[in-house]
Image: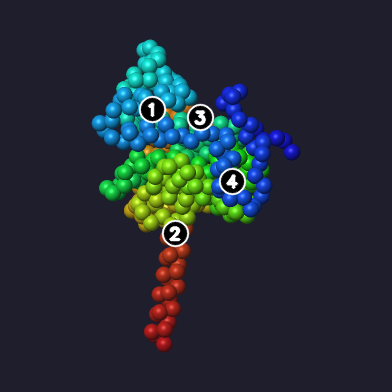
């Protein structure tokens, strides 16, 4: 069997998967203890994210926090000097970078480079690509849907969506080759969590929630990670938005996704999105997902074909309407026969 391709960002990477966790029993605590050996807690990143929530944040305080993490500072400077910003000259001062990026862009950059990117180092390419497609799609969809709910903060929903699948990266860091084989054999939103439960005793949703809690990140981030595959536990608009994003992360990227009917029903039930609104949402999300990928310096493989999705959605709608009509005709025929006897 060919060795899985390993994604690497540099020669200073830790050897991941060198001491794989044995099959169950092996609880989240053991996995996270092994992760701690590979990565320090992203305390600086999260402190910066919290401060940047305040519109009147102290630039000097943010500068001091970022400078305490040289790797994070370097990532921020690379971003602001990238072609996406098109500045006439290089920025070499972290304070200038803070001022140029603005609070929202800086928060997302810190969240990505400080929390997510560190866990993608050494991740097999197949998982790396799939993770970013799912993470950015879930984040964008959750953020857009949250804007429809006055009680839900769109930025919190975006962050929750971005981190919902972080347990997948954690498994890959600690048990690389065994988890890759497991991941590639099972459909993500259907039988992967069951396969993880059978092998480890818990799934990536549970592990991700434990990691976010261990890092001291508050709800709703941990709750969204914990239940993003469990609709019966999604009992707030934010959690419902993240679950919608999880479904669409499959539907938008996979032709003939079996999750399309479920996604349509979920969006209509919880957000009043009809068939036309569904296609409109897909179009809006497509553009924003590509923008987010450019922002995070990620190249997404594959494409979102909204025209094909529209055709599939209308086919399912017509089939459902026909079945409903046939059922109605059958019931009517039975009633007519009963009352004419």
Q: Tell me the distance, in whole angstroms, between the alpha carbons under discs 2 and 1.
A: 39 Å
User: Mark 4 or mark 2, which is nearer to you?
Assistant: 4
Label 2 element class:
helix
Q: In which quarter of the image is the C terminus?
A: bottom left
Upstream in the sequence, badge 4 or badge 2?
A: 4
Q: Tell me the distance, in whole angstroms, between the alpha carbons under discs 3 and 1.
A: 29 Å
Q: How crowded is mark 4: few (under 14 residues within 10 Å), some or many (20 or more)?
A: few
Q: Tell me the distance, in whole angstroms, between the alpha carbons under discs 4 and 3.
A: 33 Å
Q: How crowded is mark 3: few (under 14 residues within 10 Å), some or many (20 or more)?
A: few
Circle 1/circle 4 CB separation < 8 Å:
no
42 is higher (above) or lower (below) than 313: above
For label 3, the residue is 299
Locate residue 258 relative to residue 111 in the image: left or right: right
Q: Tell me the distance, in whole angstroms, between the alpha carbons under discs 1 and 4.
A: 30 Å
For label 2, the residue is 232
Camera-side residue of 196 and 5: 196
Upstream in the sequence, badge 1 or badge 4?
A: 4
Visible residue check, residue 34: yes
Q: Which residue is drawn at 42% across and 65% down?
A: 325
User: Mark 3 or mark 1, which is nearer to you?
Assistant: 1
77 is higher (above) or lower (below) than 247: above
Circle 2/circle 3 CB separation < 8 Å:
no
Which residue is at the far bottom? 341
Question: Residue 241 at what x, y percent from top left?
Answer: 39, 48
Q: Which residue is drawn at 45% across and 38% down?
A: 136
Q: Which numbered marker is on residue 26?
A: none
Q: Residues within 10 Å of mark 1 (few under 14, many from 20)?
A: some
Question: Residue 148 at what x, y percent from top left?
Answer: 30, 47
């Amino acid at each position: 069997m060919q060795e899985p391709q390993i994604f690497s960002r540099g020669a200073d990477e830790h050897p991941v998967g060198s001491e794989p966790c044995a099959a169950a029993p092996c609880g989240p605590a053991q996995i996270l203890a092994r992760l701690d050996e590979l990565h320090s807690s992203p305390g600086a990143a999260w402190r910066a994210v919290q401060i940047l929530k305040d519109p009147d944040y102290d630039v000097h305080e943010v500068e001091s926090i970022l400078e305490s993490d040289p790797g994070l500072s370097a990532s921020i400077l690379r971003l602001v000097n990238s072609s996406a910003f098109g500045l006439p000259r290089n920025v070499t001062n972290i304070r200038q970078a803070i001022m140029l990026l603005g609070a929202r862009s800086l928060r997302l950059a810190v969240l990505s480079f400080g929390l997510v990117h560190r866990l993608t180092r050494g991740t097999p390419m197949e998982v790396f690509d799939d993770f970013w497609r799912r993470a950015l799609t879930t984040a964008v969809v959750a953020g857009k849907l949250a804007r429809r709910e006055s009680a839900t903060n769109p930025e919190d929903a975006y962050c929750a969506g971005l981190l919902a699948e972080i347990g997948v990266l954690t498994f890959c860091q600690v048990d690389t080759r065994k988890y890759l084989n497991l991941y590639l054999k099972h459909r993500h939103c259907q039988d992967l969590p069951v396969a993880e439960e059978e092998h480890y005793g818990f799934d990536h949703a549970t592990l991700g929630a434990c990691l976010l809690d261990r890092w001291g990140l508050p709800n709703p981030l941990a709750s969204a990670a914990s239940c993003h595959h469990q609709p019966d536990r999604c009992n707030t608009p934010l959690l419902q938005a993240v679950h919608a994003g999880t479904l669409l992360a499959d539907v938008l990227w996979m032709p003939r996704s079996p999750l399309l009917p479920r996604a349509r029903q979920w969006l209509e039930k919880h957000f009043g999105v009809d068939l036309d609104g569904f296609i409109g949402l897909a179009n809006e999300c497509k553009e924003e997902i590509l923008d987010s990928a450019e922002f995070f310096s990620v190249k997404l493989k594959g494409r979102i074909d909204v025209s094909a999705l529209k055709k599939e959605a209308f086919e399912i709608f017509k089939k459902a309407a026909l079945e409903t009509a046939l059922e109605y005709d059958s019931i009517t025929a039975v009633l007519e026969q009963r009352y004419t006897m």
